[in-house]
Structures are given as C-alpha cells and as structure tokens.
Amino acid sequence: MRDSLALTVIQTQSVYTINLNLDTKKMEARTVSTDRIIVGQAIQAVEKTRDSLYRMGLTTQQYELYLQKKKNIVKNN
C-alpha cells in the first residue's frame, strides 16, 4: 500500500496505526459471542470504519486510488 499509493512516512505510520486499532477491535469483536453471525456482523461493523479513517489521512488522489484497488481486490475474490 505504501508504494502503490506513494504514501509519505507520516501517512504510512497513520495507516499502520489505523490497521492496528482496527485489528484490536476485530479481536475484541470475536469475543462478543460464540455465534458466528453475531461475530461476523461485529467484524463488518469495524471494517466499515476503515475507509473513513483512511480518507482523513490520504490525499484525494490517494484515496481514489485506494478505492479503485480495493474494488479490484474485492471483485477478484
């Protein structure tokens, strides 16, 4: 991501921190219930915040490129 979006050092650190925080929240979501559906919904709720968090730290061009790359990854999976 750093290379493909040409992130600065500060942006790279910001994205790393965002990802670390989201991972922590997803780990916490896994402990909410043993019901896979409830856990899945909790994890999806955490993931839905990723784009808005990235948007705050990226330029418009970087963010648009990120969304394009994300769309391609989702499409190919």
Image (tube, rainbow, N blue to C red):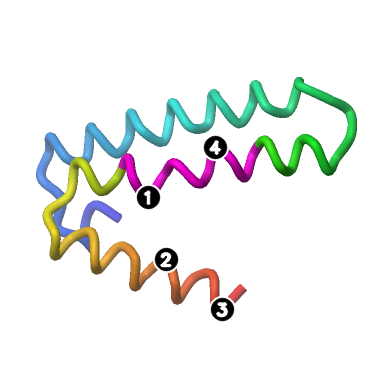
Above-or-below relation of 47 to 19: below
Q: Tag 2 or tag 1, which sits nearer the N-term?
A: 1
Q: Tag 4 or tag 2, which sits nearer the N-term?
A: 4
User: Contact (CB < 8 A) between labels 1 and 2?
Assistant: yes
Above-or-below relation of 2 to 12: below
Give 53 or 1, whichever is nearer the viewer. 53
For residue 53, side relative to residue 49 (left or right): left
Q: Position of residue 35 (x, y in %)?
A: 89, 34
- Badge 1 element: helix
| Residue linked to disc 1 | 51
Q: Nearer the viewer, mark 1 or mark 3?
A: 1
- Badge 2 element: helix
Q: Residue at x 64, y 26 (%)?
A: 27
Q: Residue at x 54, y 24 (%)?
A: 24
| Residue linked to disc 2 | 70
Tell whether position 47 is magenta.
Answer: yes
